[in-house]
Image (cartoon, rainbow, N blue to C red):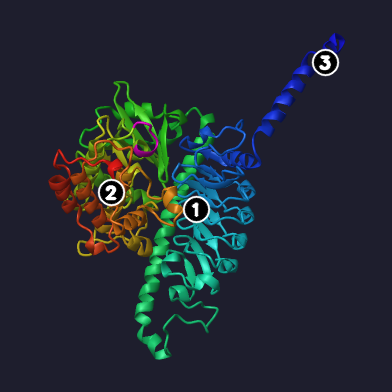
Amino acid sequence: MGIFLEKWSGPWLLYILLLYIITNECRAISRDGEALLSFRTAVVSSDGFLIQWRPEDPDPCNWKGVKCDKKTKRVIYLSLAGHKLSGSVSPDLGKLDQLKILALHNNNFYGTIPSDLGNCTELQGIYLQGNYLSGLIPNELGKLLDLKYLDISSNSLSGNIPVSLGKLDKLVTFNVSNNFLVGPIPSDGMLTTLPQSSFDGNRDLCGKQISTICKDDPRESPPNSQSPNSDQNQGGKKKYSGRLLISASATVGALLLVALMCFWGCFLYKKFGKHDRKGLAMDVSGGASIVMFHGDLPYSSKDIIKKLETLNEEHIIGCGGFGTVYKLAMDDGNLFALKRIVKMNEGFDRFFERELEILGSIKHRYLVNLRGYCNSPTSKLLIYDFLSGGSLDEALHERSEQLDWDARLNIIMGAAKGLAYLHHDCSPRIIHRDIKSSNILLDGNLEARVSDFGLAKLLEDEETHITTIVAGTFGYLAPEYMQSGRATEKTDVYSFGVLVLEVLSGKRPTDASFIEKGLNIVGWLNILVTENRQRDIVDPQCEGVQAESLDALLSVAIQCVSSTSEDRPSMHRVVQVLESEVMTPCPSDFYDSSSD
């Protein structure tokens, strides 16, 4: 025995032990776990949600975002919505052949939709909306005969809608809006019964569902067509609708292109920038200039540029659709947030020059202060106040400590006042168009500041108050905005109402618990209202809830998320009600969720 150990000692023994360990580790995880680990490998950046996925676990059933069948331990549910995941969607998800719900929406996924998903024949819901997915819709999705919910809207998908999707006779929800799809909409199966909103915002779709005749099929005519004369009588309306659809689609495409290019700049920088210790040195070299607003930056341009040159990937604190955000620390200890926006072209540059000049003049307690910007050869570096409390999204969904009732009310009040100032007191007035919890920042005292309205389209038409550039985040968008791309103050009010529901419930607008039922947070609220259980929306972890202020706040939220824009209040009115009815409730009337 001693001779044997002596013979196999040294590097050979180490090699055998290492091989044994690796082999056993590989056997430690189930087949579904291996598929999910492959999915995680394809994710190049996130908010840290996937760190808890450990390969040494026997199965993935206790991983965040994963739900398994209790008996078989097979994965039946994968929900990773809104976790800033970027990268491609791994085709190994097709190995989860017992998967029922796949929810990856509101992230930064790019690349194609894997055709391997066609192997997941148990799928009942696919939610991929609000990403940067491109390429064709896979024909293989037509194999998913149990599919009830398919939402791939607000991506960059192109090509035709596969005819195979017409075989999905169990579809309840189908949405391919706001992509670059072309050609005839299949006139088979459930696809013939879908509303126009399922297809809005595409470049060149045609078919009866959207009352648009396909050029290559003169026999096909829109619904309710009676005669050539009636077609002529309605010609003006059709031309107007066609122009509106083309205009909305073009602006959708422009916005998606800007967001995609800025996202790619952010992704490539974070992936490869770590090897370039110069950081932003290349951006600010060769003709960069500093523009300061009202003396808000008590530093020389030379000092600021010198600091900018030292920033690298270690200073990144955020990466959104329109640029990377850095933390900038000056020598005197003052902190700033630096948003890097890549220049697109001369027109884009002129637009921002004009807009920044106006935004730099806006000062308000409940708005994030724009101090100035660096105009570099390749980008604009916007300098904002740094808020130590992070975002409301982080406070609600990512931190262990819970916000109490008073803190939530103060945050809602601050956001309302900031948005009301943009709508009613700015000149010209501003529509934010992307109100959401990640765009509400908090200071050290949990006071709210509305941020990221630098891309808001300034209202120039004093009569219509309408803009046509589609922006925003799925789950917060008003129904009429999603259909037409026409933004008004009332579309902001709707988003604010969704924000209030998010703060009240502690759930994201497209939480997994809603998706299972084909709903979002507004749909859930509507069900609770019909059952007279609207108080059930309140977060059970929230302490100190007062019944009177809760009821008043729910009344405001219900009005804000009305499906009819005319029924929504103005933000001035919202602030008045919040001050008079919500912030001053009867102190003895506390709401105990356990008593209901």
Disc 2 secondary structure class: helix
Contact? badges 2 and 1 (CB < 8 Å): no
Report which residue position mark 3 lands on: 8
Helix, strand or loop at disc 3? loop
Q: Is residue 251 above or below residue 103?
A: below
Instruction: Give the answer, above or below, for where 444 lies relative to 230.
Output: above
| Residue range corresponding to the magenta coloring | 396-401
In this rendered view, identify the residue nearer to me: 17 or 469: 17
Kind of residue at badge 3: Trp
Residue 28 percent location from the top left of the image: 66, 32
Do the residues under discs 3 and 2 have CB atoms within 8 angstroms?
Answer: no
Q: Position of residue 19 (x, y in %)?
A: 74, 26
Q: Main secondary structure of the magenta part?
A: loop
Q: Which residue is mark 1?
A: 128
- From this viewpoint, is residue 186 visible? no
Residue annotated with mark 2: 535
Disc 1 is placed on an element classified as loop
Amino acid at the residue labelled 1: Leu
Mark 3 vs mark 1, CA separation in Å: 54 Å
Of callouts 3 and 1, the N-terminal one:
3
